[in-house]
Every structure is written in C-alpha cells, then in structure tokens.
Image: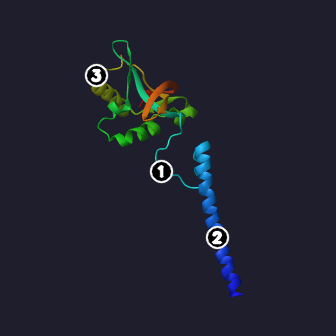
Amino acid sequence: MENSHKRKIRGGFYLFAAWLIFQYLMVGIIGVIHSEPWPAFTLPGFKNVFDRGEFIEQKVPVFVVEGADGETHSIRPSRIFSDIPVSHHNGIMRHQFNPARFSSGGRIKMLTPEGYDWLRARIEEEAGLMPAGSGQILVVWSDHFYRIRGEEMRQVSSVPVDTLFVMRAVP
C-alpha cells in the first residue's frame, strides 16, 4: 500500500516536470513564430520586449491655447507641471484631464476658479504666453505611433483622438 502511495507521488512529480518542459517549449515555439504568449503559460519576464517590426502606440496629451498673437500653441504637460515630479505627470493627466472620464457630461472639465487661474498662470509662466481674453484651454490627446528598427525608435505618425475643453466653473 505504501509503495502505491509513493508511486502516485512520484508519478505526480514526473507529470509536473513534463508539464514544465512542455510549457517552456511552447513559449519558445510560439515566441519565435508569433509573439510571447504571456500570461497563458508563464508570467512575463517584466522587461521591455517589443515584437519585430510592430508599432508601439503611446497616448500623448498636450495643452492647446490660443495666444494673444492669435496663434495656436501646444504646451506639453511637463512644462505646466515642471515643479511636480515627472513620475506624477501621466497620472495627473489621466486622472484630471482624460476626456474618457467625462464622457457622460460631454468633453468638458470644469475647474474651480482657483484651479483654472493656477493653470492659466502656469501657461503664462512656463510657456510665456497667455490665452487671449477668456481664451479656451484645450487638452488634445493624440495617439503617437512608433516603429522600432534595430536599436532605433522612430515616430511614424500622430493622430489626434480626443479633446477636452477646460473651463472655469462659475462659483
């Protein structure tokens, strides 16, 4: 009886070892033919691994204002939030200025008068321009597409996908 129990445990161990070998073979084969099958068989190696010749897409926001000169100016969030750690910029933009968050009420972000005044002051201070009169402040989100060739990454296109109107709330 005890021999039978040991055989079952040993058989389970061999089955588990065979499964591990099978899964790593599948990862290697599928990885060469198509792409790595994460997380179907194993967890990813948590490193940047890009497929050959494919595009990389990145959503990029910019503030767009009309200056007193009548020209339209694009200002990167990194210039507006220059006194905030860079690691927080994307989180602020996604949480506070992402049009998808406001789809039920239109593409409008109402800021408190203090918040709106701060944003306009930062635009003036960091970008050296001020929206004309009560000029609109927009946040335009674009999809930037990059292609990797060897060790080089090049932007191949940029497509605006959404716009958020930033307005001052009436107290």
User: Taking the image as drawn, is residue 40 in sight?
Assistant: no
User: Taking the image as drawn, is residue 30 in sight?
Assistant: yes
| Quadrant of image for the C terminus | top left
Mark sitting earlier along the chain (2/1): 2
Q: Is residue 124 left or right of residue 29?
A: left
Q: Position of residue 84 (x, y in %)?
A: 32, 40
Residue at horizontal 49%, vertical 28%? 142
Considering depth in this image, is 86 or 55 the residue closer to the camera? 55
Give the Cα distance between marks 2 and 1.
Answer: 29 Å
Q: Check if mark 2's residue and mark 1's residue have beta carbons within 8 Å.
A: no
- Report which quarter residue 33 is drawn in: top right
Q: Crowding near pointer 1: few (<14 within 10 Å), some, many (20+)?
A: few
Residue at horizontal 55%, vertical 54%? 43
Mark sitting earlier along the chain (3/2): 2
Mark sitting earlier along the chain (3/1): 1
**Dot 1 lies on which element?**
loop
Q: Amino acid at mark 2?
A: Tyr
Give the Cα distance between marks 3 and 1.
Answer: 41 Å
Q: Amino acid at mark 3?
A: Gly
Q: Nearer the viewer, mark 2 or mark 1?
A: 2
Residue that numbered label 1 is attached to: 46
Q: Position of residue 91 (x, y in %)?
A: 43, 41
